[in-house]
Structure formats: structure tokens, C-alpha cells
Image (cartoon, rainbow, N blue to C red):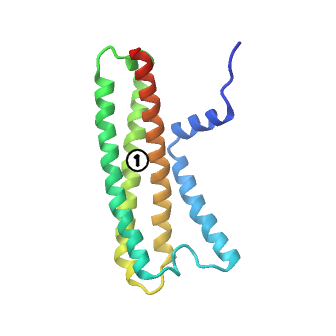
Amino acid sequence: MVVQPSRLRKVSYAWVRNPAADWLLAIALPAIWATGSLVTGSSILLTETAPDVRRVVFQSLVALSGTFAGFVLTSVTILVNLLRTPVSSLDRLLSASDKCHIGEVLLSVLTRLALVFISALIALIIDSTCPRGVWWIEGPVIASLVAALSSIMRVIWVLRRLLAVTESGAG
């Protein structure tokens, strides 16, 4: 009897194999937020938030994006050590193209984190000095943050799978 993968598993595999899904989510979430704000008559994104609060938000995003970039670089180091171990269980289970795809997944998060860093710095310099927030500056910050979070979740998913494979192969 062949066991069919569940719909959730199929979606998760499709998400892992298609990093462009990060950008779909990144565009959709701020667009839904802005549309909801326009429909309800509330402020768009962070425009009505006090400048000091926006400054703290943007400073936090700059610091967190740098911290998570360190996490990713550490993960890449661990991955390189795992993939270079000769005759490991990963060599038996993963093809060269799968190893390349795993590397691409881990490195793609760095570009998203760099965008969070740069857009939050720009917002920190421009938006937090204005008495009222500027939605077209805040939008890219939120979009790049959503893309980076999705990409970080993908890295964690891949690392969990790799650790499960190495544990099952070691036993």
C-alpha cells in the first residue's frame, strides 16, 4: 500500500522548493493590511504611530536582521560540515542537486535579511524623523520583513529535516 502525502506536506514541500513564495507573501500581507486600513478608515501601516515608537521599531529590525544573519551564517557552517563528512548518511540520501538546493535555501535568506537591514535603516533615517509616518517607506520594510521571516522559517525547516536524516542515518 502506497501512502499518499498529506496536503499540508505537499504545500510545505512546494514552499521549500520555491523561495519566490516569500515575495508573494511579502506583497500580499502589507497589501491586505493597507487595504483593510483604507476600508476601516484606520491609519495605513505605521503612519499614525508616534515617531519615537517607529524609531524603536526600525532600530529593532536593524538589530534583529543582523542577528539573524549571524544565525544563518552559523547554520551554513554547520551544513558545510555535515555535507563534507565523507560517506555520511546524507551522501546516501541526497543527490548533488539536492545539496545545491539546500545551499540556495540557506543563502537566499541573507538577501532578504539584507533588504530588511537596508530598508529599516532608510526608514530609521527618513520615516522616524517625520511627525507622521510615510507608508511608501514603511511598506517595503514590512514586505522585506515578511519575506525574511518566511525564508528563516524555511531554513529552520530544512535544518530540522537534515538533523532528522543524520540522526536516523547514525543509528
Q: Is residue 95 visible?
A: no
Q: Nearer the viewer, residue 157 or 21?
A: 157
Q: Is residue 9 above or below residue 111?
A: above
Residue that appears at 63% across and 33% down: 10
Residue visible at 30% across and 43% down?
73
Q: Considering only vertical position in the picture, is 118 above or below 39?
A: above
Q: Please rate how many residues cluster around mark 1, counting C-alpha atoms within 10 Å: few if below 14, some from 14 to 19, many from 20.
A: many
The answer to whether residue 120 is above or below residue 1 is: below
Check disc 1 and give the amino acid type: Val
Pick the front one: 164 or 29? 164
Q: Quadrant of the N terminus?
A: top right
Q: Which residue is mark 1?
A: 109
Image location (x, y in percent) of residue 110: 36, 49
* Image-based side of 86 in relation to 60, left or right: left
Q: Nearer the viewer, residue 93 or 136?
A: 93
- Residue at the bottom extreme of this rendering: 131
Looking at the image, which residue is at 44% across and 40% down?
156
Q: Under tag 1, what secondary structure?
A: helix
Horizontally, is 13 left or right of 93 in the view? right
Residue 118 percent location from the top left of the image: 35, 64
Position of the C terminus, as image quadrant, is top left
Q: Position of residue 44 (x, y in %)?
A: 58, 76
Q: Look at 45% across and 33% down and name the residue there.
A: 160
Q: Is residue 137 visible?
A: yes
Nearer to us in this view, 110 or 78 = 78
Mark count: 1
State left or right for residue 170 relative to residue 42: left
